[in-house]
Image: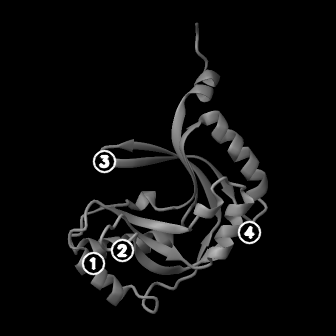
Amino acid sequence: MKLTTEYYKLALKMRAFISFKLPYELIYSLKTTTQNLKQFGTDIRWVTQNNYHITISFYESVTETDFEKIFIKLSETYSELSSIKFSLASIEISPNLHHPRLLWFRLSNETHFQEVYKTGNFVDDNKFKPHITLGRFKSSQNIVNLDSHLQNNYSIDKIDKNIYSINTIEFVKSTISDSGPTYSLLKSIRLK
């Protein structure tokens, strides 16, 4: 029996997510921040500059066909939305210093991000918290030094207050390897 491309689209599962694409100026700022924070020797797996994004919805296992259906549905809805203006609000360690897992930036204008999220009718409504991940902790090694630096240099009054604009929503495939995730753009939707 000859298997067609359409069969593979229906049967093969992939990891994928829908995200807001970040502007280049912000990516550069995040890269600079990450380089600055690396000096503390904290045991973190840093996100590479090509992988910075704001996740809207993540799919652990989805077929290409189902992801295409989601894209078609959302492109009708999202293409009518305006771009989102925001700034960085704070840098945080979650869930806490004793058991750190994530180093991330909280964003301003959370309400607008929430509205865009709700427009998509995603199942996990109460889980969405717009943020940009800088890295994932492997251990709490040197975390006290890092936290002290964050308190002194990245407090609300000292953080980058540039206003950024998001104009694109991306549909991305994520392939996991020993060296970390590799992202492949599948489709995108341009906001007004």
Mark-to-mark CA distance, 1 and 3: 24 Å
Mark-to-mark CA distance, 2 and 4: 29 Å
**In this figure, which residue is indicated by the disc labeled 4?**
82
What's under tag 2, amino acid-wise?
Answer: Thr
For residue 93, side relative to residue 37 (left or right):
right
Mark-to-mark CA distance, 1 and 4: 37 Å
Q: Could you tell me residue 178's position as x and y percent? A: 30, 44
Label whose residue precedes the other's in the sequence (1 or 2): 2
Label whose residue precedes the other's in the sequence (2 or 4): 2
What's under tag 4, amino acid-wise?
Answer: Ser
Mark-to-mark CA distance, 4 and 3: 36 Å
Q: Is 159 or 58 nearer to us in this picture? A: 58
Q: Could you tell me residue 106's position as x and y percent? A: 50, 75
Q: Are marks 1 and 4 in contact (CB under 8 Å)?
A: no
> Is 186 rendered above or below residue 167?
above
Residue displayed at 39% across by 43% down: 176
Q: Residues within 10 Å of mark 4 (few under 14, many from 20)?
A: few
**In this figure, which residue is indicated by the disc labeled 3?**
179
Q: Nearer the viewer, mark 1 or mark 2?
A: 1
Residue displayed at 42% across by 71% down: 30
Q: Nearer the viewer, mark 1 or mark 3?
A: 1
**In this figure, which residue is indicated by the disc labeled 1?**
146
Q: Which of marks 1 and 4 is in front?
A: 1
Q: Nearer the viewer, mark 3 or mark 2?
A: 3
Mark-to-mark CA distance, 1 and 2: 16 Å
Q: Is 168 or 40 nearer to us in this picture? A: 40
Q: Residues within 10 Å of mark 1 (few under 14, many from 20)?
A: some
Helix or strand or loop: what does disc 1 sit on?
helix
> Is 165 rendered above or below residue 174?
below
**In this figure, which residue is indicated by the disc labeled 2?**
32
What's under tag 1, amino acid-wise?
Answer: Leu
What's under tag 3, amino acid-wise?
Answer: Ser
